[in-house]
Amino acid sequence: MSAASAGLAAAAFGVGDFLGGLAARRDAGRLVVPVSLLAGLPPLALAAWRGGGFGFALPPAWCLFAGGGFALGTSLLYRALGRGQMAAVAPVTAIVAIAVPALADILAGRAPTGALVLGLVLAATASALLCGLDARWRASTRNRFVIATAIVAGLGFAAFYIGLDHLAQGPGRIEAVLAVRATALALTAPAALWHGQPALRREALAL
């Protein structure tokens, strides 16, 4: 069941990254991020309410850590997707996002080192093959900046996964996701408002 859930989660993240990247290319990325975060709150709130309400006390420090990581990761990922090749950006972000939490589990003694390290090596190899970055593409200063942005975005998502892992140890797992997403929204919305981003066009809003 956990493997199936992880596969569905990966598919959902992939679809979200693809649609968010398209929207960021068509409109200002700073506005795409808070709008997409806001769109996820109602179904999460409904799921939390149907699951028993909001009677769980969540550690605010971990909510801020995970929410800040998600805000950073999403903002930079959409920025990189809007400026670069999706096939190059997404695998780089993904391998960094999974490698850091995996290494944290290894250091904490919570994961089988041999199998996990082998999996990380295979995932890194797959990421490099998927990127297909030739020497000419890597030589561009702009493209190097895009890849660096994708790496930092991966670190943000890694912080999100690590923080969410701590929040998921107790009751109120859906409430934890809701709190993290609301925190990310609170952190990203001021930037969009401060820069006076124009309203999203209908196509970008639909994405």
Image: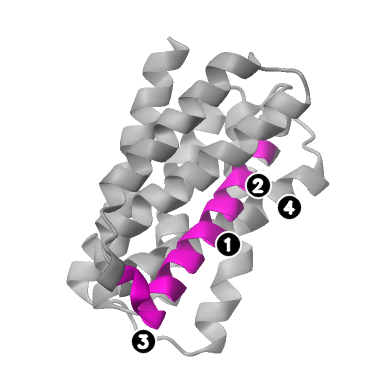
Tag 4 secondary structure: helix
Precedes in sequence: disc 4 or disc 2: 4
Q: Is residue 87 magenta?
A: no
Return the mark for residue 198: 3
- Locate the C terminus by quadrant: bottom left
Q: How far, Cα to Cα, is label 1 from label 3?
A: 21 Å
Q: How far, Cα to Cα, is label 4 from label 1?
A: 12 Å
Tag 2 secondary structure: helix
Magenta-tinted stretch: 137-162
Return the mark for residue 72: 1
Indicate the amino acid at tag 1: Leu
Precedes in sequence: disc 2 or disc 3: 2
Q: Is residue 95 above or below residue 110?
A: below
* Residues at discs 4 and 3 in contact (Cβ within 8 Å): no
Q: Confirm whether residue 55 shows in the render.
A: no
Return the mark for residue 110: none
Q: Position of residue 99 (x, y in %)?
A: 56, 38
Precedes in sequence: disc 1 or disc 3: 1
Q: Is residue 196 above or below residue 186?
A: below
* Residues at discs 2 and 1 in contact (Cβ within 8 Å): yes
Q: How far, Cα to Cα, is label 2 from label 1?
A: 9 Å
Closer to the camera: disc 2 or disc 3? 2
Q: Residues within 10 Å of mark 1 (few under 14, many from 20)?
A: many
Return the mark for residue 159: 2
Indicate the amino acid at tag 3: Pro
